[in-house]
Image: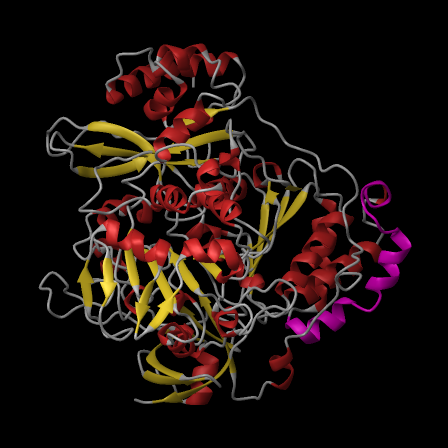
Amino acid sequence: MDRRDFIKIGATLAALFGLSKPSIASHLEKKIITNTKTEFINASFNLKSEVGIQLSAIPSTCQLCDSYCGIIGYVDSSGKLVKIEGNPLSPNNKGTLCSKGQAGLEIAYNPDRITQPLKRIGKRGEGKWKTISWDEAMDLIINGFQRNDKNITGLKTIKDTLPDSFMIHYGKGSDPFLLNKFVSAFGTKSVYGSNCQTATHLKDVSNSKFILIFGSNPLETNLALSQRLIKAVSSGVKIVTFDPRFSNTASRSTEWIPIRPGTDSAVMLAMAHVIMELGLYNAEFITNKTNISIDEIKTHLKQYPPKWAEKISGIPFNKIWDLAAEFAANTPCTIITNRGISAHYNGAMTERCAYLLEAITGSIGKQGGSLLPILGKWGTDLNTFPCDNNAGARCTAPLLKDSIKRPLVYLSYGANPAYSNGNCRETIELLKDEESIPFYISVDINMSESAQLADLILPDASYLERYSAFSPLSYDFIPFIQICQPVIKPIGETRSFSDVMIAIAGHIGGDMVKAFPFKDTSQYIMESSGLTEGLKDDPYAKEYGSAFDYLKHTGIYIQGSSVRPLKSGRIEIRSKGLPILPEYLPIPQHLSKKDDELVLISYKINVHSNSLTANCKSLCEIAHGNPAWINPKTASIKGIKNGGRIKIKSAVFEIETFALLTNDVHPEVIAISHHGGHWAGGRYSISSKQDKEIWWKGNGVHPNWIISNNVDPMSGFWCGNDTLVTVEVIF
């Protein structure tokens, strides 16, 4: 792109935004001069409205997954949102947007939204509710109430006595940027998140020469990373994906290797064995950057030769040998991991094995390898996220069962534990139990499977109706901050839970008030913007009126040039608190696996984001069923026909669904996506027969009914991919 074209794009953007202040063109030209990376401007930016009306464009942030893509909301003169697209100024998504992001307006305009606070008046799960005011809801939260002559404790008393008995479970539907500040001021450590992996580094795939993928499917789950992977493979970078299922990511990789579930670490350790055996390791890096010697690594890895790994993983030993040699010969190289390995009994240990493999090739803290994430910096503590080392404990059922850890007040915020935990029957019974959980508050936009079991439902504002602030992971390692602002007015009496937390702090008083010296979220972001390094002194920002006004016009501020941090100190390969060195941990129940049993795995698809998009009509039209993938060889042994009805049994429960026979799944595996089978959430999520617009039949099946609530003993992460099942033919 030459300078003339670049300025044309900036001028067009300025026209679209209707800016009377300094044009974005001049701002972008300034960024070229300061050598900030600018190829994110090469993105389509639709300026025409097909309906022929004038639209206003409001930049914001999509919050339907962890990518936090920059978006543009197109609003008509009546204030109605008619279209969402990507923001070309975003370094991550570069103006593009996935189907989930474009369907976001269906979340805001969902016909089944909860728009007023609701108080339960029947038994939990009975579906009997009373509409109450926000003042009444706040009184219940702060001061508690009486139920059947029993006092139910409110947050004001809990904060002064047992702060840890207030448990918060936040999910991907939450807006977490003020949550850390809130829980710190309240004093509770019982904060649990929904996270899909235990890895802590970001992979610089744009500069890598060889990429291994274990248990990750970014082409369906992460727009920013998928863009860079597609570019890498198109430029000749070899990408090898290990996955029991032929995912979209596997289909775009150089090679797909169907691996036996839970055995990834065996392959990693065997590859490391080969690299050390052939002398292909980076001796200088191991000596100077790790806490272990070369001889220690060699001695430890002798027990993990490729022929040993072949027996465990099913991958031919010569394939493991060749891949290891090729991986080490093409540095910088990197390994991408995610829930496919984290959701196993040995998930955290497998992540350690991946880091060992990267460490011996010298690919940690190096361009093209594994790097610590780089984030933009706000002027205040907006940079912190809620995490007291519990974020990986996605399955809350064991905590709710624990007589010591179980809370007096349980609050699920954008989380749906009745659906997302394993053994759904167990979680439902736990949430129904008033003795175990005296007060259950659900913060949600829909009557989800969990919300319908609550005592009190607070109607949350969608991400299109609220203020928030982000420092997203930067996939080009360019630090930037990003704002989320209301694109439309809140529907009904919905409120941003960030504003609700500020109000709760005000009612409790004391230290809570000191922690929240502002009236609402927008004031906090405005004050933080004015203190943000670079932005506060940017002459272009000042000409908009203020740093906050500048962010509201652009949505994004880039802080400096491309930066790739090197990890300081020594990388811990030898551990003190864990097993000393990365090792192979077999999955206990797999050791006694019978010949007629299959391993059940679940996976995400590209058009749904857990419960967040469950009631989006257009997405449900695209994907409303989720048959069980079974290999034809396995099916022939069991007499299963393509499209046939089958019963799947585990030690926990049983479900029924239809079979899809395909060679795209390992013969020892049965795979079911975990977006289907909703029994609450709205007319589209349950495929209500009462709605004439719903032309499709059925809504699939939910695999979590038959998955146990076991967790990884090291990380606390839910072992969602370990379940053994049998399959019977119904017809």
> In what quadrant of the picture does the C terminus appear?
bottom left
In the rendering, at what x and y percent does residue 330 appear? 70, 44
Magenta segment's dominant SS is helix
Quarter occupied by residue 296: bottom right
In the image, farthest residue toward the front = 149
Q: Nearer the viewer, residue 316 or 108?
A: 108
Q: Nearer the viewer, residue 426 or 374?
A: 426
In the rendering, at what x and y percent does residue 727 appear? 43, 86
Whether residue 332 is situated above or below residue 594 in the rendered picture: above
Residue at 29 percent across and 46 percent down: it is: 462
- Residue 4 visible from this viewpoint: no
Q: Confirm whether the magenta stretch covers residue 307.
A: yes
Residue at 27 percent across and 54 percent down: it is: 137
Q: Confirm whether the magenta stretch covers residue 244.
A: no
Q: Is residue 54 left or right of residue 436?
A: left
Whether residue 626 is situated above or below residue 237 in the rendered picture: below
In the rendering, at what x and y percent does residue 377 appear? 53, 30
Q: Look at the image and name its color scheme.
A: secondary structure
Q: Nearer the viewer, residue 96 or 678?
A: 678
Region rendered in magenta: 285-314
Q: Is residue 426 left or right of residue 380?
A: left
In the rendering, at what x and y percent does residue 371 appear? 64, 40
Q: Is residue 416 left or right of residue 486?
A: right
- Residue 412 visible from this viewpoint: yes
> In what quadrant of the picture does the N terminus appear?
top left
